Image: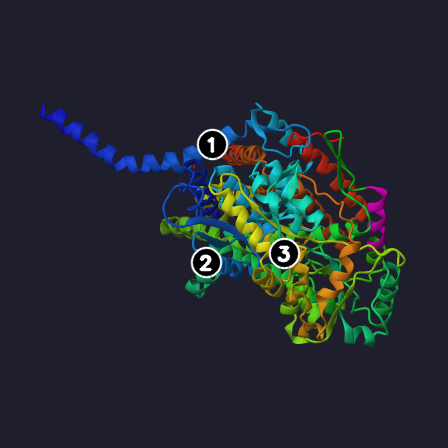
Amino acid sequence: MSVSRHARRRVGTAAAFLLPFALLFAVVYLAPIGYTVYESLFKLHRDGLGLSAPTKVFAGLGNYADALHDKDFRGSLLRVLVIGVVQVPVMLGVALLLALLLDAKTTLFKRFFRLAFFLPYALPGVVGALMWSYLVAPGLSPITAAAHGLGLHLDLTSDAMLAPTIGNMLTWAWTGYNMLIIYSALQAIPPELAEAARMDGCSAWRIAWHVKIPIVRPALVLTTVFSIIGTAQLYNEPAVLQHVAPNLSSSYTPIFAAYNAVDDNNFGYAATESVVLAVLAFVLSFGFLKLVQRRGEVL
Amino acid sequence: MRSRQIRTVAMTAAVAFVAVLTGCSSGSTGAAQSPAAAAGPVKLDFWGWAPGYDQSVALWNKAHPDIQVTFDKTPSGSKGGYTKMLTAAQAGNAPCLGMVGYETMPSFAAAGALMDVTSYMAPAQSQFAAWTWNQVTIGGKTFGAPVDTAPMALIYRKDLFAKYGITKPPVTWDEYAADAAKVHAADPSVALGDFGNDSYNYAGLAWQAAAPWFGTGGGSWQVSVNSAANRKVANFWQGLLDRKLLKTDPSYDPSLYADMASGKILSDVNAVWDTPIVASSVKGTSGKWAVAPMPVWDANNPVYGNDGGSATVVLKGCAHPKEAAEFATWMSTDPASVSNLIKVTGIYPAATSALANPALSQPDPFYGGQVVFDVFKAETPHIDTSWIWGPTMTQTATDLGDGLGTSAKGSTRLTDVLNTVQSKTVAQMKQQGMSVS
């Protein structure tokens, strides 16, 4: 009897600790998701000119069909996909390289470089984006001016250069952060491993390739998943860049498109676009996880 | 990576949704919830962004202890102010009063965000210019009081016009093009004007050319953004862009004012409310500017454009519509309020009695002591007042703004932009359940 009372009290204690979390989780996480999905199933119904208050009618998957036919929305998804496919590997490659350099025994000024690589992440994202937008703005850009001095006509905000410019902003801001995660994983490698390899006559590069990189693979997988989710939510950089590049379309990324729908008072459609984006981010990040897991590696 | 960004976005979204769910959001306490029978003064919230509105509100509050208005400054309409009002109306906690441009009135009506105050407003009708009354009356229901209209003019550098051999400001668009070529020939780094990316400024140019975008008939909308008349306007500007005769700084951007301050851009075709904006943006060149009528298509039959004009509207759910309508009428007609709005906000009043306001005949030192309102006053009878706005203007303006931006870069042609805007506008109207013919 005393045991069951003890157990009951333990359950009670656990519940008391869990309740605030569960409540917050339900209110700020589950409820908004549920509400978004619910909203996405409704359309506004109007008569003729539609100049009086509309009624909300159940539309089933009507909004989803519209979203899939929406050329702008599809374009924004594709654009972000292309930016991600190019930018994420470049960024993670650089992050890995920097982490390996920092980890190398012979590297000088380790602490300085560690801080220097990480510094861009310490800046608020919008500040970084503002800085870059001034660095690429036509008429202000020192880069364009320098290129002009060399006889090159460079416009970093031309239609074709927008995606590379945004990719550069992202790489600049996030490489240090990813580098730190990979570097931490490197730090956890027992020194004996590298020691043994070195005694077997392994060069520093071969140690990196055959010993270190396979061991930090989980960290690479983790940073890739974060990067996929982050790229899907691309907003800050293009939003700031738009001020100096009015040719950057206002449906440039899926989040832009959803905001536009809110501006148009088309809440159901905005909810639909949000759900599509969330599902896509989920599929891509978990698809990536499944892919690397199938190849015999566990996160 | 980007965990912080993810968190911020998630948090913002969550907070916003919780606010929607629980029906509470910042700045919404006020008239909507307070019972009409409560003791003490009636309290009204008023959302807007124009400078000077707060001073008119202060004048009202001093004279009306029973009805106290609180002015909350929001981001400007196109920068999020409208979204904020619409979202609040959707959530049932909008303020009683809102500042809404004529161009957005149909969109607000289509969202069901406006309150019918016809019975309270009707007595005031005779005090306003007829066409401005039509802008606040949709489908026979009046939703508020007009505040201002926005005739357009040519704001230009007198001294630099003289320097480049332009003896008098261009009267017609042909003269404008010729002057632009003259300036370009003298110094290719200087331009007569700027081709910005502000959709409503462009709308004013179409308005002037009798090139309407919207019409109604038989209970459905007609969209004519790419009509022949609109293509004429587009081809004119495309011609100037092709010859690289204009700068292409984004509208109202620091780069534009930097170019204006350094004499790289000599003029701007803009609305009356832009005159104080230019004055405060290029202070260092005070006294060198002047205002002339905007160039016209036909000198024998001058017609001018309008870029803006706004109303004080009563929003859905207001518990004190009578008092709200009373305030809205007062703000647009009271001499002290009007002269404050003319001086600080730079409005051109919609109330006919206000046209005699002494503030309209004050010389402006920034414009070399010119009485700039005289120009606008002379133009007003020659503005086409039949123009109507569509119910999805936010989207139309966004698409056009995108197109103007790419045209400025030279990657699209304006006539193609008009086609895109046309088809997207029709699609958007259909998506929102309206009938389009």
Residue B313 point in image, percent of width and height: 57, 46
Determine crowd level at label 1: few under 14, some 14-19, many 20+ residues with C-alpha closer than 10 A: some
Residue B248 in sight here: no
User: What amino acid type is highlighted by mark number 3?
Assistant: His
Determine crowd level at label 3: few under 14, some 14-19, many 20+ residues with C-alpha closer than 10 A: some
- Discs 1/3, front: 1
SS at mark 3?
Answer: loop
Q: Nearer the viewer, residue B1 or B49?
A: B49
Q: Nearer the viewer, residue A143 or A158?
A: A158
Pointer 2 or 3: first along the chain: 2
Pointer 2 or 1: first along the chain: 1
Q: Nearer the viewer, residue A156 or B330?
A: B330
Above or below, B358 against A162 in this view is: below
Our reading of the magenta stretch's main secondary structure is helix
Tag 2 residue: A122
Tag 1 residue: A35
Q: To which chain does the residue with label 1 belong?
A: A
Determine crowd level at label 2: few under 14, some 14-19, many 20+ residues with C-alpha closer than 10 A: few
- The residue at the point 41 percent across, 48 percent down is A185
Q: Give the side of residue B257 with respect to residue B331, left or right.
A: right
Kindly report the distance in space between the C-alpha atoms of the residues bearing marks 1 and 3.
33 Å
- The residue at the point 83 percent across, 53 percent down is B238
User: What amino acid type is highlighted by mark number 1?
Assistant: Tyr
**Labels 2 and 1 positioned on one and the same chain:** yes
Q: Which mark is residue A243?
A: 3
Pointer 1 or 3: first along the chain: 1
Q: Which residues are magenta?
A: B227-237
Q: Could you tell me which quadrant the C terminus of chain B lies in?
A: top right
Above or below, A36 against B361 in this view is: above
- The residue at the point 47 percent across, 62 percent down is A116
User: What amino acid type is highlighted by mark number 2?
Assistant: Ala
Q: To which chain does the residue with label 3 belong?
A: A
